[in-house]
Image (spheres, rainbow, N blue to C red):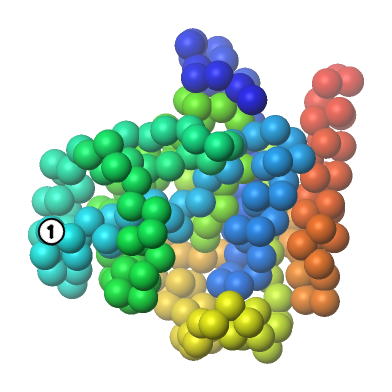
Amino acid sequence: MTSPVKSQKELDARIVVAIDGTSASGKSTNARLVSRALGFLYVDTGAMYRTLAWKCLHDRIDISDEKAVSGLIRKWKTALESKDGQVRLLVDGYFPEKEIRTAETSQAVPSVAAMPKVRDWMKLKQRECLRLGNLVMEGRDIGSNVFPETEFKFYLDATLSERTRRREADGVREDLALRDRRDSSRAAAPLMIPLGAVVINTSGMTPNDSSAQIIESVRRRLDGAAGR
């Protein structure tokens, strides 16, 4: 595992594997498998947005009031930490691991995540994660907005029926078609296939199969770079 950065040269040499994609396409599972195989830190950017949504609910901030939410992110005390191979966003030194997975928090996330100022703040914080080590970062705008310069971009997708089946297997009922339209049409950093990304359709594939494709691609490129 890499250690916290000490110089700009070290920071510039660090690697980001960006895994974007639609809901229930396998981003989280694949990102975890890839990060373990490569020895990189795993970053779940969705958890960061969930943390903000939880904080708004905790502080009784109106999640539809962009001015109020923007005021919160200007003053809340946050920090990044690396624990058990994962980067976490702390609020006042606390990581609300269970609270961010409640139904109430899940319902609040889309409202805050669509706000341009929120996405601007998150982009800066997510780029800051690189100071902790090489990253496998998953989300919906990593390769297109947060780290567009990375050479390691992947976009996961699956059929709507397959993604719906996966959600229901987890006990979650969600209108994924609506979620896709909302994510793709928002004004700030919409969901899209990043330029130069390797597209992987995970329908009918196991996580081990799809993650193996990503791992092989990354290692091949790293070996090629080392040989130049």
* Rendering coords of residue 18 (x, y %): 62, 47
Residue denoted by label 1: 59
Left or right of residue 200, residue 172 in this image: left
At 45% across and 58% down in the image, what residue appears?
A: 46
Q: Is residue 57 above or below residue 51?
A: below
* Rendering coords of residue 153 (x, y %): 67, 48
Q: Quadrant of residue 64?
A: bottom left
Whether residue 147 appears in this view of the structure is: no
Q: Is residue 217 above or below residue 186?
A: above
* Rendering coords of residue 126 (x, y %): 43, 41
At 77% across and 62% down in the image, what residue appears?
A: 207
At 51% across and 82% down in the image, what residue appears?
A: 172
Residue located farthest toward the front when viewing the structure as drawn: 98
Quarter of the image that includes the N terminus? top right
Quarter of the image that includes the C terminus? top right
Count the numbered circles shown: 1
Left or right of residue 124, residue 169 in this image: right
In this rendered view, identify the residue nearer to me: 207 or 71: 207
Left or right of residue 90, residue 136 in this image: right
At 56% across and 27% down in the image, what residue appears?
A: 133
Per the image, label 1 sits on a secondary structure element best described as loop
Amino acid carrying mark 1 in the image: Asp
* Rendering coords of residue 205 (x, y %): 82, 70
Left or right of residue 69, residue 26 in this image: right
Q: Is residue 209 above or below residue 86?
A: below
Q: Quadrant of residue 51?
A: bottom left
Whether residue 171 appears in this view of the structure is: yes
